[in-house]
């Protein structure tokens, strides 16, 4: 698959490296391609471009920008370049404020997630929340004694979710589909829960697992 990754940070790089490892073609979109010179030098086949070029290139898009900049990055990508495509959304609505006792501040409320805002602003794109609730170091084929970790996803379009679930599977996770876009109100705060252990105990390699009673 041709994947356009919007972002140049740790998540964009982790996802980009993983997708290349699994045989996908990748273009990373950024406002400043110089930032990715080291990534391109170490990842054969990786391309870079503007947000719009990466989105146009893509059959599937990965959104990996700062939460406060997500709308602007998508506007720069261009609604026409997003239309009809799955957008795997790893962003979190983290506010520009320090954590309180390890708890991050969000700029959204529990009545509307960031992904719902993005979906409303770009109705023809097919947003799927995924990979927002684990650190970038553990996103691709992590090994845990407790077995496969769980990636909670949601979104309005079943076909887009199936595409994203395929990547989740390639990256060694099991998918828990929580339903429509509103479920992002619950999935985005998993980032807050995940980060508490980081900020308070300096643990950054854990992951969530959903256990079903047989
Ligand atoms: N770090 C993690 O382990 C982790 C894990 C799960 C989820 N997440 C979420 O994933 C997202 C990416 O995280 P990250 O740590 O990789 O990077 P980040 O530092 O949160 O974001 C960097 C990206 O944001 C873009 N950006 C910043 N300001 C912008 C603006 N005004 N307009 C357009 N783009 C702008 C930058 O674009 P340029 O390339 O143009 O500079 C860059 O690509 C975040 O929403 C984060 O909450 C992070």
Image (cartoon, helix red, strand yellow):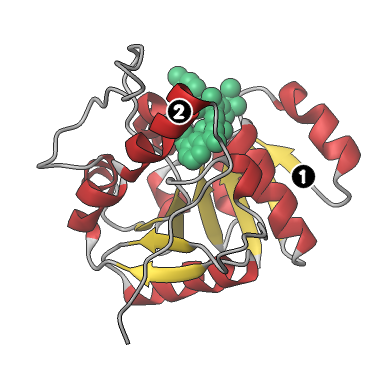
Residue 200 shown left or right of residue 36 in the figure: left
Identify which residue is drawn at 65% across, 68% down. 1
Mark 2 neighbour density, 10 Å: few (under 14) some (14–19) many (20 or more) = some
Q: Where is residue 59 in the image (x, y as percent from the top left)?
A: 56, 63
Residue labelled 1 has its Cβ within 8 Å of some atom of ligand 1:
no
Looking at the image, is 195 positioned above or below residue 56? above
Q: Where is residue 64 in the image (x, y as percent from the top left)?
A: 51, 39
Identify which residue is drawn at 43% across, 62% down. 209
Residue at mark 2: 66
Residue 109 shown left or right of residue 88 in the figure: left
Tag in front: 2 or 1: 2
Question: Which label is found at residue 47?
Answer: 1
- Which residue, as the protein is rendered here, is positioned at the far bottom? 214
Looking at the image, is 45 positioned above or below residue 141? above
Q: Position of residue 57 (x, y in %)?
A: 63, 54
> Does residue 160 appear anywhere in the picture?
no
- Which residue, as the protein is rendered here, is positioned at the far left? 111
Residue labelled 2 has its Cβ within 8 Å of some atom of ligand 1:
yes
Quarter of the rendering containing residue 150: bottom left
* Viewer-proximal residue among 7 and 54: 7
* Viewer-proximal residue among 62 and 56: 62
């Amino acid at each position: 698959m041709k994947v356009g990754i919007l972002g140049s940070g740790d998540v964009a790089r982790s996802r980009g490296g993983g997708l290349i490892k699994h045989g996908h073609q990748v273009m990373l979109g950024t406002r400043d391609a110089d930032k990715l010179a080291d990534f391109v030098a170490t990842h054969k086949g990786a391309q870079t471009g503007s947000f719009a070029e990466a989105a146009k290139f893509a059959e599937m898009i990965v959104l990996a920008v700062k939460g406060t900049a997500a709308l602007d990055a998508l506007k720069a990508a261009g609604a026409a370049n997003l239309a009809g495509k799955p957008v795997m959304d790893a962003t979190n609505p983290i506010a520009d404020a320090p954590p309180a006792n390890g708890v991050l501040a969000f700029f959204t409320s529990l009545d509307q997630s960031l992904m719902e805002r993005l979906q409303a602003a770009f109705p023809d794109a097919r947003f799927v929340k995924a990979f927002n609730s684990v650190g970038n170091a553990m996103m691709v084929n992590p090994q845990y004694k407790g077995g496969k970790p769980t990636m909670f996803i949601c979104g309005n379009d079943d076909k887009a979710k199936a595409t994203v679930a395929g990547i989740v599977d390639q990256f060694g996770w099991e998918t828990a589909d929580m339903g429509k876009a509103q479920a992002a109100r619950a999935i985005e705060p998993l980032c807050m829960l995940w980060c508490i252990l980081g900020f308070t105990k300096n643990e950054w390699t854990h992951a969530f697992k959903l256990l079903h009673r047989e």
